[in-house]
């Protein structure tokens, strides 16, 4: 696992948290590919329809975030989500 990524596991809901610096998403993408391969190797399936991505950008310069694909399907980008009972919003208001 790359030091800028963390996987939080609770029951059957893994959460991948990745720090993307200087628009370099490669470590984050590799982590997701490793997670997908691990699930496949252990006969687990990721429900892409229930998979969401939330982008939190603390940079002064806003940049485009490339669309994420899992198992050939695009992952929805959301502005808020609920994680372990806590509601998170992309700007933390």
Image (cartoon, rainbow, N blue to C red):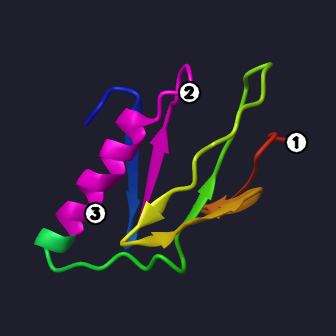
Q: Residue furthest right?
A: 93
Label 3 vs 1, first from the N-terminus: 3
Disc 3 versus disc 2: nearer the observer: 2
Residue 79's quadrant in the figure?
Answer: bottom right
Residue drawn at x 36%, y 72% is: 71
Q: Which residues are magenta?
A: 14-39
Label 1 vs 2, first from the N-terminus: 2
From the image, tell me which residue sits under label 2: 23
Label 3 vs 2, first from the N-terminus: 2
Residue drawn at x 24%, y 52% is: 34
Residue drawn at x 18%, y 62% is: 38
Residue in front for this viewpoint, 91 or 55: 55
> Where does residue 47 sit, x and y in percent of width and height?
43, 80
Q: Residues within 10 Å of mark 1 (few under 14, many from 20)?
A: few
> Where does residue 13 sit, x and y in percent of width and height?
43, 68
Q: Residues within 10 Å of mark 2 (few under 14, many from 20)?
A: few
From the image, tell me which residue sits under label 3: 36
Residue 60's quadrant in the figure?
Answer: top right
Disc 3 versus disc 1: nearer the observer: 3
Residue drawn at x 51%, y 31% is: 19
Residue in front for this viewpoint, 32 or 92: 32
> Where does residue 83 sit, x and y in percent of width and height?
60, 59
Contact flag, marks 3 and 2 (Cβ < 8 Å): no
From the image, tell me which residue sits under label 1: 93
Residue 86 counted in the magenta span = no
């Amino acid at each position: 696992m790359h030091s800028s990524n963390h996987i939080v596991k609770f029951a059957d809901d893994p959460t991948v948290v990745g720090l993307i610096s200087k628009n370099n998403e490669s470590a984050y993408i590799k982590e997701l590919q490793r997670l997908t391969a691990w699930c496949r190797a252990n006969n687990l399936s990721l429900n892409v329809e229930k998979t969401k991505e939330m982008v939190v950008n603390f940079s002064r310069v806003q940049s485009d975030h490339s669309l994420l694909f899992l198992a050939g399907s695009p992952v929805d980008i959301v502005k808020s989500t609920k994680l372990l009972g806590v509601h998170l919003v992309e700007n933390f208001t």
